[in-house]
């Protein structure tokens, strides 16, 4: 595209999934035990969105990636020490809770506000990226609402692939049941894209990229606006861990075939 | 447990990055934090996978192992050592950066850490003492290619050690030789180098080698280090692989070199004097500058292993009885497993406390070298400005600088008048004073952390392994504890075995600036103890006093045969005192890191809420470690103070020092009460009676002073076991992740 895309990625922290996650009653509602003390990672769906954004930006000169994050400032800063090394972006930070127990409607409002305040954002070049759901809340509604608030009605969720056609139109593959994808073609930006896993691996850390990003990351964290989410009207009747017991095993880099084989074995063994 | 034990907040989670950044003082260094994340992702990713897949089971350098080098390059680990002008990303000194990277890699595998560090070790002679051209050339070659760049990344090896019977790491004599092969008129001489290396890391793939050689030619003076390249004419034989039992993720071979090189490859260059090539630096000058930095990193590696053992051991202990019929979910046996038993908790507390103290000591040493590197430049400028060139001139200048530091230390303790205040201010701002002060610390901290972290660390690593039972000594042990134990022994050996560190300490620890500083530290610890009684600071201060007294005593005293005790050859004395000192230094730094956390933790919202939980626990660990340190110091000092005297016997000389009961009766009329107290001064024995013991009790000049200090120190142990009970309780409650974040 002429002049490139302006890609805004929304994403924040979730507790490292290897940690013991135990719901407890906090002063302002449910929370996870010791949540502030647990190491955090970038929400995996949002991470896919970020890698896809960076990849797209690299292919279309003049493009730029903003990463809009609402989370506790100190935790975001820790996260940046690894994430800022992966791909180039400019951070827009909001200081507030990233808990899975906060209301997605309010979160969407804060995110939309932050996006609107990015100077010189050109809607005709705008791709709004995020995860199709978050690993902490798992409702899959936040990005939709951010889009609605910004008046972006072309929305795609559960996206695994976005290609730019020669005429500049966007071809998107959205997940449907049974491992199939629905193919859509959208004439032009702005669009909302809620990413599933995408197609890209996690980029390796590169401190050179990190040092460049840090020039804008630290000032962004310093001026991060405090966002107080009200808990008004939000009640939790009960909070439980999923029923099944976790049997965690760490395996990295298994091929799809190996994983499939193991699943089949497991199903058969039952 | 006593009620005191229930007052503290317990430890909620294992300490994370936020905490470590504060304790180890890099919370404002984003470059370092990023290097940590990068190194961690390589360590817990490809490195851990290799170990889990059994890549350590061969001595050969395999294709899989070689992939690690690419991972180091891609993730920025290789360029941590490079200055930004050569493509690196960290400005200024890199000691702390390298220490942190080594810590992360060694958390999983020491060999991987060594593999990455060996490249820096190869470059270090060039970095520290090379000419500007040499630095530029080799740094630029070794920096990983940037995107779009098509070039081979050079890798280096450092070759000092030679086949027996030649050099150990500190030997003055070298088997490797250099002579002039050709010296065309008016042109640069061509040198012939013959060098055999032994146990040389990176040798499977090194493109260049920095090698120590001695002159075998009247036209070359002394010794030097040279740079050898694989394409130089002659033999560049990589030799046989070393059949190592440790660090198998690094490459080690015994190479043979017989090469012709231009004289310009002498590291640091040379000067022509009366037709003789005089290298600007001897090999020992270069090696001293190199090792005093790189040894710190080796020490840090072992501390990482100890701390990495905590989580897998807790998990093992808790899950020990699950699945059995006698252990139903919700029962203490199911939830706590082995942690129902006090001993396993106490031993794990010791492992953690040791790891904590070792890491504190290692990182402090690294930071001191970072500061020193910046000041060294100022010192060199000063020497140049003042025309200080010869060895003697330098010694004189050094003496003057030391005088200033001593004055500074005295005034900083007690400056009353305005004139004194002014002088104090002046000395405080004098960078040479700062340099000399830091230098005296660096000279002690480096060998201390190399010696104690690796040596004592290896012993404690064995304890960690034993806490895992049979599992501990299998390849499947989570956290690879068995391998880490064995690897720790290499860390204790490479770059100079323990004896070399002890020798260095026995000289540097008696430096008058260091000792003055040591006295200041004792005073400071008492102040700390006043404010934070639970840290063991008082106990530690008492142990430091005992050590200092013992050193002074031994420097004057003679053994039973009238031979001086404190001297170079008497390693039984000097080495033991050096060992004792290390315990003190580690424990002190651990306390200082705790204080840093207490003071700065509140500023970080991610830490503030749970700060009390961590400081309470770390405080207990400090107390426990201070107690272990004072126990060790007490044992060593007592052996030294008493052990070189011959025990008095029941002969006439021995009896002469005893009271006779009849004599006491007479004395009682002159000194009322003496009969009752005499036995606390000497034995009371009748003339012909031989009591059932080795001889009369020992007395010597100063023995009362010593006994008083030792008694005071023992009293200071009060509360240390309560601290251990509390820490043990905390370990039985702390929340740990569901699984280790690297494969098993
Ligand atoms: C896997 C591995 C990798 C290595 N990589 C390299 C490398 O890349 N480059 C390199 O140059 N070298 C390397 N080395 C060699 C290493 O630095 C030496 O092995 C080490 O310094 C010890 O020297 P040494 O083996 O000659 O032991 P020795 O010097 O023989 O020491 C053996 C023991 O003798 C005693 N001892 C020695 N000297 C004294 C003394 N003065 N006073 C009292 N006791 C003493 C001590 O008990 C000591 O532990 C490596 C070694 C290994 C095993």
Image (cartoon, helix red, strand yellow):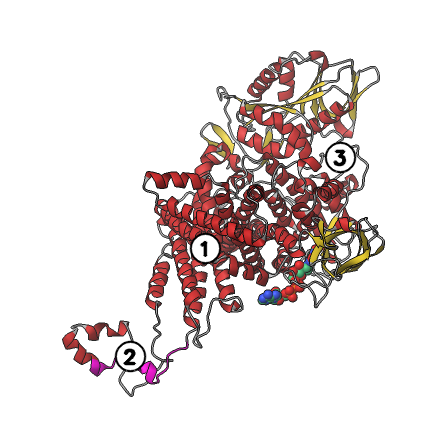
Q: Nearer the viewer, residue B215 or B634?
A: B215
Disc 3 sits on a residue from what chain?
B
Which residue is label 3 attached to?
A: B146
Residue A143 percent location from the top left of the image: 64, 20
Q: Is residue B495 above or below residue B641?
A: above
Q: Nearer the viewer, residue B287 or B613?
A: B287
The disc placed on residue B512 is 1
Reply yes or no: does residue B657 show up in magenta.
Answer: yes
Which of the two discs, 2 and 1, sits closer to the camera? 1
Residue B534 seen from this side: no
Which residue is label 2 attached to?
A: B658
Q: Quadrant location of residue B31?
A: top right
Residue B325 percent location from the top left of the image: 56, 55
Q: Is residue B94 above or below residue B191?
A: above
How many marks the image carries: the answer is 3
Reply yes or no: does residue B572 show up in magenta.
Answer: no
Disc 2 sits on a residue from what chain?
B
First in residue order: circle 3 vs circle 2: 3
Region in magenta: B646-663
Cα separation between marks 3 and 2: 82 Å
Q: Is residue B468 left or right of residue B668?
A: right
The disc placed on residue B350 is none
Task: List the single residue furthest toward the bottom.
Answer: B688
Q: Is residue B696 left or right of residue A128?
A: left
């Amino acid at each position: 595209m002429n002049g490139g895309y302006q890609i805004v990625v929304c994403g924040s922290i979730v507790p490292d999934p290897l940690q013991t996650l135990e719901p407890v009653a906090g002063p302002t509602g449910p929370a996870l035990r010791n949540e502030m003390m647990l190491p955090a990672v970038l929400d995996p769906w949002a991470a896919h969105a970020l890698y896809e954004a960076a990849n797209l930006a690299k292919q279309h000169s003049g493009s730029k990636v903003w990463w809009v994050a609402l989370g506790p400032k100190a935790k975001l800063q820790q996260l940046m020490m690894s994430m800022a090394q992966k791909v180039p972006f400019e951070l827009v930070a909001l200081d507030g809770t990233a808990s899975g127990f906060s209301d997605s409607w309010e979160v969407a409002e804060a995110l939309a506000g932050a996006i609107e305040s990015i100077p010189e954002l050109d809607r005709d070049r705008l791709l709004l990226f995020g995860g199709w759901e978050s690993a902490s809340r798992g409702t899959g509604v936040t990005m939709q609402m951010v889009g609605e608030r910004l008046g972006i009605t072309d929305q795609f969720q559960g996206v695994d692939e976005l290609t730019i056609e020669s005429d500049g139109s966007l071809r998107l593959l959205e997940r449907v049941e049974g491992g199939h994808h629905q193919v859509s073609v959208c004439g032009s930006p702005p669009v909302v894209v809620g990413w599933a896993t995408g197609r890209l691996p996690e980029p390796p850390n590169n401190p050179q990229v990190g040092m460049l990003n840090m020039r804008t990351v630290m000032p962004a964290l310093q001026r991060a606006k405090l966002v107080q989410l009200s808990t008004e009207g939000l009640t939790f009747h009960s909070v439980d861990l999923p029923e099944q017991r976790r049997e965690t095993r760490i395996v990295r880099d298994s091929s799809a075939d190996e994983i499939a084989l193991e699943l089949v074995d497991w199903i058969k063994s039952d | 447990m006593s009620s005191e034990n229930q007052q503290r907040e317990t430890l909620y989670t294992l300490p994370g990055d936020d905490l470590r950044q504060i304790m180890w003082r890099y919370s404002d260094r984003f470059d370092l934090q990023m290097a940590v994340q990068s190194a961690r992702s390589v360590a817990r990713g490809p490195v851990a996978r290799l170990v889990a897949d059994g890549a350590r089971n061969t001595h050969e350098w395999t294709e899989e192992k070689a992939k690690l080098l690419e991972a180091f390059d891609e993730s920025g680990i290789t360029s941590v050592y490079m200055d930004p002008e050569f493509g690196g990303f960290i400005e200024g000194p890199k000691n702390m950066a390298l220490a942190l990277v080594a810590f992360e890699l060694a958390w999983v595998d020491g060999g991987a850490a060594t593999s990455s560090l060996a490249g820096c070790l190869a470059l270090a002679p060039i970095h520290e003492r090379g000419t500007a051209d040499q630095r530029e050339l080799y740094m630029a070659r070794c920096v990983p290619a940037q995107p779009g760049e098509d070039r081979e990344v050079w890798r280096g090896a450092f070759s000092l050690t030679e086949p027996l019977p030649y050099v150990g790491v500190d030997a003055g004599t070298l088997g490797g030789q250099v002579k002039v092969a050709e010296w065309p008129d008016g042109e640069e001489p061509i040198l012939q180098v013959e060098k055999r290396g032994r146990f040389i890391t990176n040798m499977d793939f090194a493109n260049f080698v920095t090698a120590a050689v001695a002159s075998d030619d009247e036209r070359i003076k002394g010794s030097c280090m040279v740079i050898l390249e694989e394409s130089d004419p002659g033999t560049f034989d990589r030799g046989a692989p070393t059949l190592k039992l440790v660090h198998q993720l690094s490459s080690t071979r015994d190479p043979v070199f017989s090469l012709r090189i231009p004289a310009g490859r002498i590291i640091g260059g040379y000067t022509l004097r009366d037709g003789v090539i005089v290298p600007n630096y001897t090999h020992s000058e270069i090696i001293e500058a190199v090792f005093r930095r790189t040894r710190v990193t080796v020490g840090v590696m072992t501390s990482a292993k100890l701390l990495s053992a905590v989580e897998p051991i807790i998990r093992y202990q808790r899950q020990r009885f699950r699945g059995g019929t006698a252990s139903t979910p919700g029962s203490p046996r199911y939830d706590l497993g082995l942690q129902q038993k006090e001993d396993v908790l106490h031993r794990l507390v010791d492992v953690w406390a040791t790891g904590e103290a070792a890491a504190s000591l290692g990182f402090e040493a690294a930071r001191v070298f970072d500061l020193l590197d910046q000041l060294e430049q100022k010192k060199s400028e000063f020497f140049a400005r003042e025309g200080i060139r010869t060895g003697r001139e330098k010694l004189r200048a050094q003496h003057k600088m030391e005088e200033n530091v001593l004055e500074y230390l005295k005034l900083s303790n007690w400056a009353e008048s305005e004139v004194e205040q002014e002088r104090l201010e002046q000395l405080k701002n004098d960078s040479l004073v700062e340099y000399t002060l830091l230098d005296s610390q660096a000279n002690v901290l480096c060998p201390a952390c190399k010696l104690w972290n690796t040596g004592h660390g290896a012993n404690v690593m064995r304890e960690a392994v034993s806490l895992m039972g049979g599992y501990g000594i299998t390849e499947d042990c989570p956290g690879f504890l068995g391998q880490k134990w064995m690897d720790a022994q290499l860390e204790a050996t490479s770059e100079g075995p323990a004896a070399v560190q002890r020798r260095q300490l026995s000289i540097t620890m008696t430096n008058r600036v260091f000792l003055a500083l040591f006295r200041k530290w004792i005073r400071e610890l008492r102040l700390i103890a006043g404010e934070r009684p639970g840290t063991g600071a008082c106990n530690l201060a008492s142990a430091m006093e005992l050590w200092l007294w013992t050193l002074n005593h031994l420097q004057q005293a003679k053994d039973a045969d009238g031979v001086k005790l404190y001297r170079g050859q008497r390693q039984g004395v000097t080495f033991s005192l050096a060992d004792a000192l290390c315990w003190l230094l580690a424990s002190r730094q651990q306390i200082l890191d705790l204080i840093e956390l207490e003071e700065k933790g509140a500023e970080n919202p991610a830490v503030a809420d749970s700060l009390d939980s961590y400081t309470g626990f770390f405080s207990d660990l400090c107390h426990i470690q201070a107690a272990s340190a004072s126990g060790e110091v007490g044992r060593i000092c007592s052996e030294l103070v008493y052990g070189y005297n011959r025990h008095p016997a029941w002969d006439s000389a021995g009896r002469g020092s005893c009271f006779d009961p009849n004599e006491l009766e007479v004395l009682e009329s002159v000194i009322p009460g003496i009969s009752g107290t005499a036995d606390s001064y000497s034995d009371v024995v009748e003339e012909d009676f031989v009591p059932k013991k080795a001889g009369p009790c020992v007395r010597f000049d100063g023995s009362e002073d010593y006994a008083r200090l030792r008694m005071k120190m023992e009293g200071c142990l009060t509360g240390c076991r309560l601290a251990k009970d509390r820490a043990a309780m905390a370990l039985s409650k702390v929340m740990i992740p569901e699984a280790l974040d690297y494969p098993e």
